[in-house]
Amino acid sequence: MKKIIENAIYVLLFLSAIVSLFVIIRSSYTADIRFYIGFASIVLCYLLRLKNVIVSNYILTTVLLLGTINLLQFSYVDFSLSFTFLNITTLGINPIVLITLISLLIVNKDIIMLFTGESNSDSNEVQKQNEEMQIQGYMLDYKDKSIEELQYIINNPDNYVKPLVVAVQRIIKDKK
């Protein structure tokens, strides 16, 4: 589901930029430099995604954040909500890009963890589950070994990976 939503975000941004580029080419509309930089940013994020998804998501988050406050555009239509206070117009917010940014952040909680500096308890839980699966696999592989062979592994734990040592300890405990 996460991958589908991430891909949908990229496809929608890319389609918006392509349609806008087509409209700009076919009409007398002249685009702002913010559009061209936004278009290049989307293409860069997509190409980078082919190499490294995590870095691509971090850069896309930054690009969408800049698009939310209208420093970048992804469409020839400049849609923003801004407020005026004492004849001073504030920086506008693009609600469509903001919703896209929020969707990306909901799907990629690790991005929020990166910016807030909190540890990701979900990833710790996943690591524990993966380690337990490794232990179970080693237990199946080493269950028929002799006590002497297993004891050698326990006596030399630096020569073996931790899940194997734990698995051997469990096997010896079960055999006794």
Image: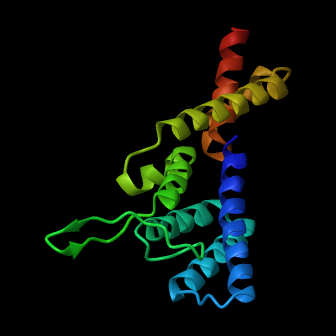
User: Does 120 sit left or right of 159 as displayed?
Assistant: left
User: Does 125 sit left or right of 166 as displayed?
Assistant: left
Query: Could you tell me which quadrant the N terminus lies in?
Result: top right
Vertically, is 42 above or below 158? below
Vertically, is 43 above or below 122? below
Q: Where is residue 33 in the image (x, y as percent from the top left)?
A: 53, 88
Q: Where is residue 174 in the image (x, y as percent from the top left)?
A: 70, 11
The coloring applied to the image is rainbow
Residue at 38%, 63% in the rendered image: 81
Question: Is 168 in front, or is 90?
Answer: 90
Vertically, is 39 above or below 46? below
Residue at the extreme left of the image, as rendered: 86
Query: Could you tell me which quadrant the C terminus lies in?
Result: top right
Q: Where is residue 141 in the image (x, y as percent from the top left)?
A: 84, 28
Residue at 51%, 65% in the rendered image: 64
Q: Count the marks: how many? A: 0
Question: Is 61 in front, or is 34?
Answer: 34
Question: Is 119 in front, or is 171?
Answer: 119
Residue at 61%, 66% in the rendered image: 56
Q: Position of residue 171 (x, y in %)?
A: 71, 18
Question: Is 28 in front, or is 60?
Answer: 28
Question: For residue 157, what is the image quadrant?
Answer: top right
User: Does 102 sit left or right of 13 as displayed?
Assistant: left
Residue at 65%, 56% in the rendered image: 9
